[in-house]
Image: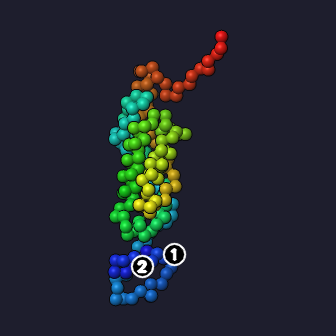
Amino acid sequence: MVTLDGAYEETLRPGGASLGKYTLLKRCEIYWVDMRDRELTVETSQELRIMDPVPLEIDLTVSVKYRVSEPRVVSLEVKNPITTLYDYTIEAMRQACSVFKFQDFLVGGSAGNSIYQHLKDRNVENYLGIELLDVLVSSISGADRAVSLMQNQGLSLIHISEPTRPY
């Protein structure tokens, strides 16, 4: 990305470029933007609480895979785009905890998809210049507490009902 006297001039293609065409009478600044796929890890500790099947504090780790889609937005228009993505992810994790059960955060559950959709709904691609690729729940701790609390209440983590038989 190239700016002249603080105003956007152009986005250069990857590789080498000659800057000789820019006059020395203007302040020329170059912004290097990493366009490769990247991953942001968001961890919480005793910050989130699920209510179903039992009230429980959980520690949750989510991996957000993304890439910069708009270098101009990332480098010039948003002060801290990755910090903002982090904050939006925490917001999405809180929302998911208010809606989903403990099982939904496990492998094959729908919590990761919900967090992804929440971020999409926040329009991060246009607002932050970041394309979301995937959101995965990397880890959830509190399972041991969940199992013991559920056993104390006579519940099981995965409920399998017996088929009804006609008599």
User: Comparing marks 2 and 1, which lies closer to the viewer?
Assistant: 2
For the residue pair 112 and 139, the one nearer the viewer reads as: 112
SS for callout 2: strand
Q: Which color scheme does this rendered protein use?
A: rainbow
Residue 84's disc is: none
Kind of residue at badge 2: Glu
Circle 1 sits on which residue?
A: 13
For the residue pair 43 and 83, the one nearer the viewer reads as: 83
Kind of residue at badge 1: Arg
Q: Residue at x 44, y 61 (%)?
A: 126
Q: Position of residue 131 (x, y in %)?
A: 49, 59
Quadrant, the N terminus: bottom left
SS for callout 1: loop
Q: Residue at x 41, y 61 (%)?
A: 127
Mark 1 residue crowding within 10 angstroms, few (<14) / some (14–19) / many (20+): few
Q: Position of residue 130 (x, y in %)?
A: 46, 60
Quadrant, the C terminus: top right
Q: Residue at x 51, y 75 (%)?
A: 13
Question: Mark 2 and 1 residues: CB-CB less than 8 Å, in contact?
Answer: no
Residue at the extreme top of the image, as rendered = 167
Q: Position of residue 14 (x, y in %)?
A: 52, 74
Q: Position of residue 31 (x, y in %)?
A: 41, 73
Circle 2 sits on which residue?
A: 9
Residue 138 seen anywhere in this rendered image of the structure = no
Residue 101's place in the image compared with 139, above or below, is: above
Residue 138's place in the image compared with 66, above or below, is: above
Q: Residue at x 62, y 20 (%)?
A: 163
For the residue pair 1 and 142, the one nearer the viewer reads as: 1
Left/right of residue 91 with respect to residue 135 in the rendered view: left
Left/right of residue 148 with respect to residue 159 in the rendered view: left
Mark 2 residue crowding within 10 angstroms, few (<14) / some (14–19) / many (20+): some
